[in-house]
Amino acid sequence: MSGKKSVKPGKWSTPGGEVISEADAARLAEEFESDDTSLDGVEITFPRKAGRPSLTGGTGTSPQVTFRLSPSVRELAERLATERGTTVSALAREALEQLVKKAG
């Protein structure tokens, strides 16, 4: 165990594990919010949006296509994807792009 005190849900604790009351937590939050300089010099970064990068070349959402396969085709596609070090989705995208390009 990390040595920190176990805190029950609805209780507050400091990073060091000291349990504090709801009133103390409210007071600390109020002090922090009223101090305009509390974040001076601190760089705040927000996590990027979850999921795959867009294929649109921008920040938009890529269109999706869903289709069904027989179990045997799925198994063969998974095997091929593993051999190529890619995903079934990437294989399907590549195959469809080639077919559409060929059809012109």
Image (tube, rainbow, N blue to C red):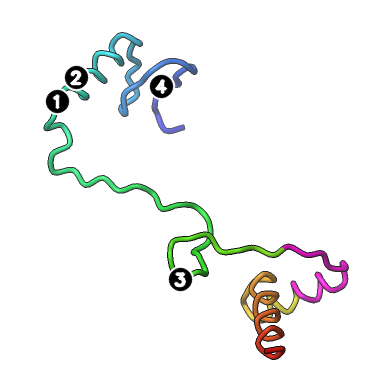
Residue underneath mark 4:
5
What is the total number of numbered labels drawn onto the structure image?
4
Which SS class for mark 4? loop
Residue named by callout 3? 57
* Disc 1 to disc 3: CB gap under 8 Å: no
Depth check, mark 1 against mark 3: the one in front is 3
In terms of sequence position, does the residue under pointer 4 or pointer 3 come before the other? Answer: 4
Find residue 7 and report its horizontal and vertical position in percent. Answer: 44, 19
Amino acid type indicated by mark 4: Lys
Q: Quadrant of residue 16?
A: top left
* Place of residue 51 in the rendered image (x, y in percent of width and height, measured from the top left): 53, 56
Q: Which residues are magenta?
A: 66-78
Residue at the spot 32% in from the left edge and 14% down from the top edge? 20
Q: Tag 2, which secondary structure?
A: helix
Residue depicted at x 69% and y 91% = 102
User: According to the image, label 2 marks what residue?
Assistant: 31
At label 3, counting other C-alpha atoms closer than 10 Å, the crowd grade (few under 14, some 14-19, many 20 or more) is few
Q: Secondary structure at mark 3?
A: loop
Q: Does 55 sit left or right of 31 as displayed?
A: right
